[in-house]
Image (tube, rainbow, N blue to C red):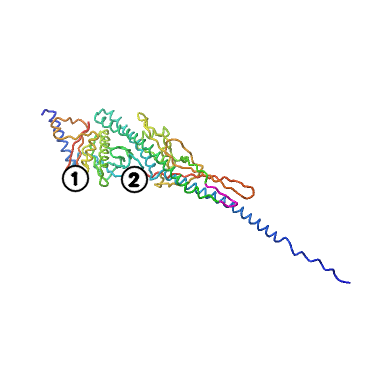
């Protein structure tokens, strides 16, 4: 007969800590993976935005390369002054009655009008060139980057950039780069009456952009188109740079363009659980370098 | 020779004398010799090349010449008034920027002196000739007599050729003797240093 405590049943040696540990590790890894995926998405979005800005800037640089457009706007305005001055000389010579002065005045007036037509033809030619160069620069930059995004991971798949939309225009509120000429006072009066000049409180009045600055009759058939481009301030020329999207205005007219807008689209697919696709769209705007002072 | 021809010849010879006096007075400025000059105002024109202008492909206006013009009253040569800038492509005038009105006293005589910033190209000579023509008209409209135009010696032929292209005709003594009508815009162009001189007329 055994007298004493009954032996206690032995504790179970097998438990669920291993399973719990594995489950915890798996869950943690999943959380880390999801976190990494989100971080990756944010990174891709930022990277895509930078690429859009690079493309827009590459195009904007070409819009006023070597200050060709700034020079053209400035010379068109000075050509306008020339026609006006020669008309004034002609009118004065006519009233004087001196035939020889009338003949010379008539020749110089004719020359100035012919050269107005020449400047307009060159303006149109230059616009075609700068738009083409800008488009080409943006396309080349796009080709450099569009393949670089694709990535294939079990939980994340990034396609290459699916589309790039490039447009051109101007920045709202930026007038022409030509400051008002004050000496020919009757023309100044005419220009202000015709609302051809933006009067600024800081004293730098400039001719309005996207405007045909017609002269008074009899030269009102001549074309003097000035376009939007930043004016030098305190002799400082603004460089080509990225600006806010909100200020961009797309244009379809025949004036010079001074800004580019780039929109890029990218698809990201997630393979975790139910598959999902995220569309990332970014845009960037860049403006051309401002005009330099007239040489 | 009838009396008209004699009158013309006297006028021409007077004009040559005036031009010679004016030229010697211009050159004597450097020597500071007092001399009575037949002009009251001096218009200075300096031309320079702008090689970086309009350098886009297929540009029809690449290669611009700029002329800087100021005038001074001869009695106060230290006080110059900046008058205008002119831009040219070859012989075509592209534009002007007026810096001041042409406040030369009406009826006064003017002289025009052309200089170049660097050794001029043929295009710059054409631009210089055109600039002179513009200033001649400004003077004539303002009732000023252009007494003399001086240009650098090496530029004389190119500038006179451009003025001829703009319908200024060179008068020779032979033409005068044959009865050339001097009524028109008469100008005398002389080189500096002296040695070359032409009388031109625009009808």
Q: Secondary structure at mark 1?
A: loop
Q: Quadrant of the C terminus of chain A?
A: top left
Which mark is nearer the camera, 2 or 1? 2
**x and y percentages locating residue A178 in the rendered image:** 39, 40
**x and y percentages locating residue B102 in the rendered image:** 29, 37
| Range of magenta residues | A152-160
Please tell me whether residue A170 is drawn above or below residue B181 in the rendered image: below
Q: Which residue is mark 2?
A: B52
Q: Nearer the viewer, residue B194 or A59?
A: A59
Which of the two labelled residues, at mark 2 and mark 1, occupies the earlier sequence position? 2
Q: Is residue A270 inside the magenta stretch?
A: no
A179 on left or right of A172: left
A199 on left or right of A162: left
Q: Which mark is residue B193?
A: 1
Residue furthest toward the left? B1
Identify the residue at horizontal 18%, vertical 36% (top origin).
Answer: B199
Whether label 2 touches label 1, CB < 8 Å: no
Q: Nearer the viewer, residue A69 or A137?
A: A137
Chain letter for mark 1? B
The quadrant where residue B18 appears: top left
Chain letter for mark 2? B
């Amino acid at each position: 007969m055994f007298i004493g405590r009954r032996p206690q049943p032995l504790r179970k040696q097998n438990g669920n800590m291993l399973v719990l540990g594995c489950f915890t590790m798996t869950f943690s890894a999943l959380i880390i993976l999801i976190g990494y995926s989100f971080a990756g998405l944010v990174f891709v979005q930022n990277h895509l935005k930078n690429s859009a800005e690079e493309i827009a800037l590459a195009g904007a640089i070409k819009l006023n390369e070597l200050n060709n457009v700034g020079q053209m706007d400035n010379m068109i305005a000075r050509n306008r002054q020339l026609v006006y001055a020669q008309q004034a000389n002609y009118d004065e010579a006519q009233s004087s009655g001196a035939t020889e002065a009338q003949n010379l005045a008539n020749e110089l007036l004719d020359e100035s009008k012919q050269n107005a037509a020449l400047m307009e033809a060159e303006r149109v030619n230059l616009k075609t060139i700068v738009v083409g160069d800008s488009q080409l620069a943006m396309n080349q930059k796009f080709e450099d980057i569009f393949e670089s995004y694709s990535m294939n991971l079990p939980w994340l798949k990034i396609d290459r950039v699916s589309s790039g939309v490039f447009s051109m225009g101007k920045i709202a509120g930026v007038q022409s780069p030509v400051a008002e000429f004050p000496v020919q006072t009757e023309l100044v009066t005419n220009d202000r009456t015709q609302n051809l000049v933006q009067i600024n409180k800081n004293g730098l009045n400039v001719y309005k952009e996207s405007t045909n600055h017609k002269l008074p009759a009899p030269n009102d058939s001549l074309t003097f188109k000035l376009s939007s481009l930043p004016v030098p301030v305190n002799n400082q020329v603004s460089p080509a740079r990225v600006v806010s999207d909100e200020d961009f205005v797309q244009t379809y007219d025949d004036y010079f363009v001074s800004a580019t807008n780039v929109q890029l689209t990218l698809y990201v697919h997630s393979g975790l659980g139910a598959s999902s696709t995220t569309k990332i769209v970014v845009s960037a705007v860049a403006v051309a370098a401002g005009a330099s002072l007239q040489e | 020779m009838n009396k008209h021809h004699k009158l013309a010849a006297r006028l021409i010879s007077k004009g040559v004398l005036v031009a010679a006096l004016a030229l010697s007075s211009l050159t004597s400025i450097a020597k500071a010799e007092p001399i009575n000059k037949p002009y009251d105002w001096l218009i200075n024109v300096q031309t320079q090349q702008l090689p970086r202008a309009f350098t886009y492909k297929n540009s029809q206006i690449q290669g611009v010449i700029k002329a800087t013009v100021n005038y001074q009253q001869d009695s106060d040569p230290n006080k110059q008034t900046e008058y205008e800038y002119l831009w040219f492509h070859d012989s075509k005038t592209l534009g002007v920027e007026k810096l001041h009105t042409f406040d030369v006293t009406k009826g006064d005589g003017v002289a025009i002196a052309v200089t170049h910033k660097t050794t001029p190209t043929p295009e710059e000579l054409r631009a210089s000739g055109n600039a002179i023509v513009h200033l001649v008209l400004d003077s004539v409209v303002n009732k000023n007599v252009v007494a003399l135009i001086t240009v650098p010696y090496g530029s004389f032929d190119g500038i006179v050729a451009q003025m001829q292209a703009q319908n200024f005709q060179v008068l020779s003594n032979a033409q005068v003797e044959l009865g050339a009508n001097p009524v028109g815009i008469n100008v005398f162009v002389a080189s500096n240093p002296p040695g070359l001189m032409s009388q031109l007329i625009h009808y």
